[in-house]
């Protein structure tokens, strides 16, 4: 069982930056593929970025490539999402998710554990 707690969301102007953190506890974090998803009102949950246990495989959605960076610190059981050059269309609730099988996909249903979400609002 893995518990995930996100932090770092907030209100920022377009062009600004935020850094999200996701602290994991209760399981073998270092084995997990970790991902960030987001969900805007009226839209489906979509993957933003994902990272394998050792950082060897990293995925970014096309919409965030070149602006967002995912990273992890297994010693701290934490995964990060650095978001730069934020746009109003990045506004959403951002969720951290863990796949204990270490596979990692873009499909939310394959992730067993989820955080409670953190709101990111980008004003124009």
Image (cartoon, rainbow, N blue to C red):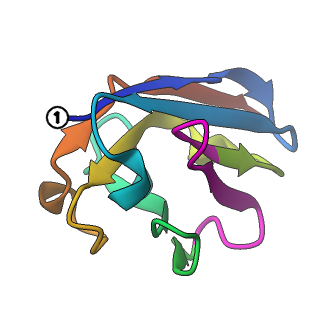
Question: Within the magenta stretch, is there residue 26?
Answer: no
**Residue 48, position in %: x, y?**
49, 59
Residue 65 or 91: which is nearer the viewer? 65
Q: Looking at the figure, which quarter contains the C terminus?
A: top right
Instruction: Name the quadrant containing residue 114.
Output: top left
Residue 105: in sight, yes or no? Answer: no
Please give the name of the residue rendered at 20% of the width and 54% of the height, measured from the top-left corner.
Answer: 111
Residue placed under numbered mark 1 in the picture? 1
Secondary structure under tag 1 reads: loop
* 75 part of magenta stretch: yes
Instruction: Give the extent of the magenta segment.
Output: 63-80
Residue at 86 percent across and 38 percent down: it is 16
The residue located at (65%, 56%) in the rendering is 71
Q: Position of residue 38 (x, y in %)?
A: 42, 45
- The quadrant the N terminus occupies is top left
Residue 113 picture quarter: top left
Q: Is residue 47 left or right of residue 14?
A: left
Whether residue 63 can be seen here: yes
* Of residues 73 and 6, the one drawn nearer to the viewer in this rendering: 73
**Residue drawn at (34%, 34%) of the image:** 41
């Amino acid at each position: 069982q893995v518990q995930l707690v996100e932090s770092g969301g907030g209100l920022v102007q377009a062009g600004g930056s935020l850094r999200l953190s996701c602290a994991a506890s209760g399981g073998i974090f270092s084995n997990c593929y970790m991902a960030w998803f987001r969900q805007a009102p009226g839209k489906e949950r979509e993957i933003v970025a994902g990272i394998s246990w050792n950082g060897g495989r990293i995925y970014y959605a096309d919409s965030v490539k070149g602006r967002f960076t995912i990273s992890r610190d297994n010693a701290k059981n934490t995964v990060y999402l650095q978001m730069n050059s934020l746009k109003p269309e990045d506004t959403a609730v951002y969720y951290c998710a863990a796949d204990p099988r270490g596979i990692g996909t873009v499909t939310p249903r394959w992730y067993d554990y989820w955080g409670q979400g953190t709101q990111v609002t980008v004003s124009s």
